[in-house]
Image (cartoon, rainbow, N blue to C red):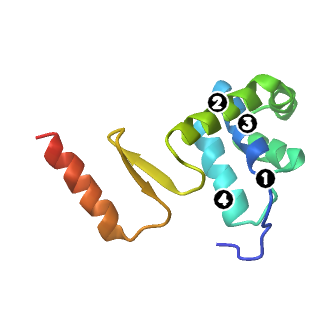
Amino acid sequence: MNFTGPFGISSRLALAAAKVAELLGARNDFHRATMAAYWQQGLDISDRTVLGGIAAGVGLERAEFLANLDDPVFDGQVQADVDLAHTYGLSGVPALIFANKYLVSGAQPLEVLQRVVAKVAGEQE
């Protein structure tokens, strides 16, 4: 993990970029590459140039990717996700929802997650 930053940046454009990558058929590869770019390489994922490089690195055509990124429909999709999260009472990350009814918010010990999984599994029996 890169502990030098960048910190305090907005991931909003990267979230829209992930929507574009999904449209173009590279959702999982783009997600992995974006996480590595930020957490391992310390790159600024709020920067269009960085996102274009990530897209090219996973086999997407840079110009097509960036042209799609300019389409406001993708930011609208991100806003819809944010609105849905707020209806669940989420305002930060990490947040995990199990079985559409149990919210685990914040970084929790493994034991907490194991208890929730066991509870959900017990309810499905």
Rendering coords of residue 55 (x, y %): 75, 40
Q: Which callout, 1 or 4, points at the residue further toward the start of the chain? A: 1
Kindly tell me whether residue 92 is visible in this rendering.
yes
Rendering coords of residue 4 (x, y %): 77, 76
- The residue at which mark 3 appears reads as 16
Q: Classify mark 3: helix, strand or loop.
A: helix
Q: Which callout, 3 or 2, points at the residue further toward the start of the chain? A: 3
Q: Which callout, 1 or 2, points at the residue further toward the start of the chain? A: 1
Residue for point 77% across, 70% down = 5
Question: Of residues 19 and 49, which is closer to you in this image?
Answer: 19
Image marks 3 and 2: residues in contact by CB distance under 8 Å: no
- Disc number lying in front (3 or 2): 2
Q: Which amino acid, by three-letter code, is at mark 4?
A: Ala
Q: Which amino acid, by three-letter code, is at mark 3?
A: Ala
- Disc number lying in front (4 or 3): 3
Residue for point 81% across, 25% down = 72
Separation of marks 1 and 4 at Cα, in angstroms = 17 Å
- The residue at which mark 1 appears reads as 10
Image marks 4 and 2: residues in contact by CB distance under 8 Å: no
Separation of marks 1 and 3 at Cα, in angstroms = 12 Å
Q: Which callout, 1 or 3, points at the residue further toward the start of the chain? A: 1
Q: Which callout, 4 or 2, points at the residue further toward the start of the chain? A: 4
| Picture disc at residue 80 | 2
